[in-house]
Amino acid sequence: MPRQRTRRPKIPLLATDQEIKARRKKLPVFAAHDLRSLIGEAKASQRAGGDLTLLTVFRRHNEAQLNELLRHLGIDPSQPDAWLRGFFFLAHYYQGVGRMAWYPRRANRNAATWTLTADLALLAEVTMLTNQGLSERGAIKKLAADRGKRQLFPYRRQTLRHSAKGTEQQQREANLRSRLQKLKTGARERGLFGLNIEGQSEEPDFYERVLQHLDLAPLTTRAGEKPTPL
């Protein structure tokens, strides 16, 4: 049986799927034109000396419906780009054109079970313990020994690898210490936390602040709090 691909998690931006569905429901759905009525309108025009044909009457009713649809989309039909904007909104609502989302980075194979939430939890716990006076190594040792914290961090006991040395407690410490070092190295290389590659102070730009805000969202959600505004 072929392996089913898991859907990549995403965080929609600008508008959620529920908001898009709600906007669709507000758009009018028109009933079909009554052919008998259209024919009668065309004949009445011709009897009065007009030149309206069935096709002309049909197109006029279509145009009236299109203008009403544009207005429901918040577009003035008299604007020169009204049709282009109207087409874009319909493509946006129904086909996903112009939608935007943030996709968390995929974890590498060496850290397959480490999620963004676990990474942020590790940073938060180590920061809290070091603020209480522990060294970074002491904070890691305390976390590895705390059974109440173990569900926060992924761990697989290495029993078959030649590199699996020491007790389970020591392996847990090595696992957390290695992950923390990778996070710190990656943060310096990406210029996060106000540092560039050379370690010099650097103010993140608007887009970097947005990504940092999104990276922090899973941790605050786990703690039952709302992410702070940018």
Image: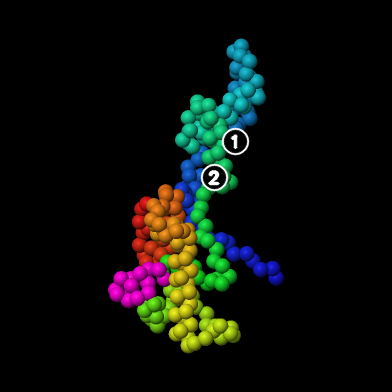
Magenta segment boundaries in residue numbering: 122-136
Q: Which residue is mark 1?
A: 32
Mark 2 neighbour density, 10 Å: few (under 14) some (14–19) many (20 or more): few
Mark 1 neighbour density, 10 Å: few (under 14) some (14–19) many (20 or more): few
User: In the rendered view of the protein, which quadrant contains the N terminus?
Assistant: bottom right
The single residue placed furthest to the left in the displayed view is: 132
Q: Which residue is mark 2?
A: 98
Pick the front one: 75 or 171 = 171
- Number of numbered callouts drawn: 2
The single residue placed furthest to the right in the displayed view is: 1
- For residue 62, above or below residue 113: above
- For residue 145, above or below residue 30: below
Q: How far is the residue under mark 1 from the one under mark 2?
A: 30 Å
- For residue 183, above or below residue 43: below
**Callout 1 touching callout 2 (CB < 8 Å):** no
The three-letter code of the residue at mark 1 reads Ala
Q: Majority secondary structure of the magenta segment?
A: helix
Pick the front one: 131 or 189 = 189
- What residue is shown at x 65% (from left), y 20% (from top)? 53
Q: Position of residue 90 (x, y in %)?
A: 55, 40
Residue 202 counted in the magenta span:
no
Pick the front one: 212 or 76 = 212
Q: Earlier in the sequence, mark 1 or mark 2?
A: 1
In this orientation, does residue 46 appear? no
Q: Position of residue 213 (x, y in %)?
A: 41, 56
- What residue is shown at x 63% (from left), y 15% (from top)? 51
- What residue is shown at x 41% (from left), y 64% (from top)? 219
Residue 127 counted in the magenta span:
yes
